[in-house]
Image (spheres, rainbow, N blue to C red):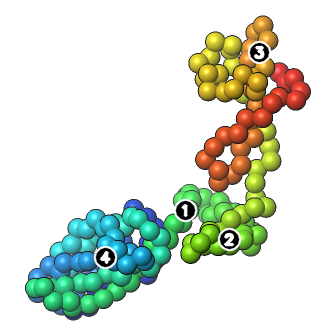
Amino acid sequence: MRIQHEDVVSPLAPLAVSIEGAQTTPSIKAIAPDGKPAFVRRVLGRSGGTLWFSGLLGEHTLLWRCDGQEVARTTVRLEAQTRIQTSDPRDQTLFHALRQIVDADSKVVAEGDRKIRTHPDWVRDHIHKFITSPDDYHLGFVKPEFVYVDEEKACFSGCQAEGDSRLSFWPRTTRTG
């Protein structure tokens, strides 16, 4: 039996699988990089199908079985990837060049047995400013010392770091309108 699929897939992205020479639909056991069973959603038939992975990033081993016997062993690397698709080829060139520049400045940091890729030189340094009415319920989510309220409007500012899921609010240093 011959099994073919791409070597790398993103989490929850479809992985097309081609199977040749199978008499029955094979079963599959997926093993994550930590040696534990991996979570794989599968839709398979005798000639192939689709797999969707989630869980740990890294190399996953796939054990293919027919009638209870292992007939093949393949690997696929689960790797998080950002993709931007656009119909304008000029945008693709721009995004590719930007990705190369950002990746060139990345640093890999070891945290225990994990490696984390960081981009410390690519932190957004601009301040977000919001203007709303003093009775806007969103102001309830901001500490009072970070809000300036005058007679007609409320103003608060924040600084957001790219890649950080939190929005940190800083005290307003100058009045803006």
Dot 3: few (<14), some (14–19), or many (≥20) neighbours within 10 Å?
some
The residue that mark 2 highlights is 109
Neighbours of disc 2 within 10 Å: few (<14), some (14-19), many (20+): few
**Above or below: residue 74 compared with residue 172:** below
Residue 149 got which mark? 3
User: Is 70 positioned to the left or the right of 85 in the image?
Assistant: left
The answer to whether residue 72 shows anywhere in this view is yes
**What is the distance, in whole Å, between disc 1 and disc 3 at their CAs?**
41 Å
Whichever of callouts 4 and 2 sits on the residue coming sooner in the sequence is: 4
The residue indicated by pointer 1 is 83
Q: Which residue is mark 4?
A: 30
**Please, which residue is most extreme toward the top here?**
151
| Helix, strand or loop under label 2 | strand
Q: Mark 4 or mark 1, which has the lower sequence index? A: 4
Q: Is residue 128 visible?
A: no
Determine whether 96 is above or below 72 in the image: above
Q: Nearer the viewer, mark 1 or mark 3?
A: 3
Give how far across and how far down residue 11 sits, in percent.
43, 64
Tag in front: 1 or 2:
2
Q: CA distance from mark 4 to mark 3?
A: 57 Å
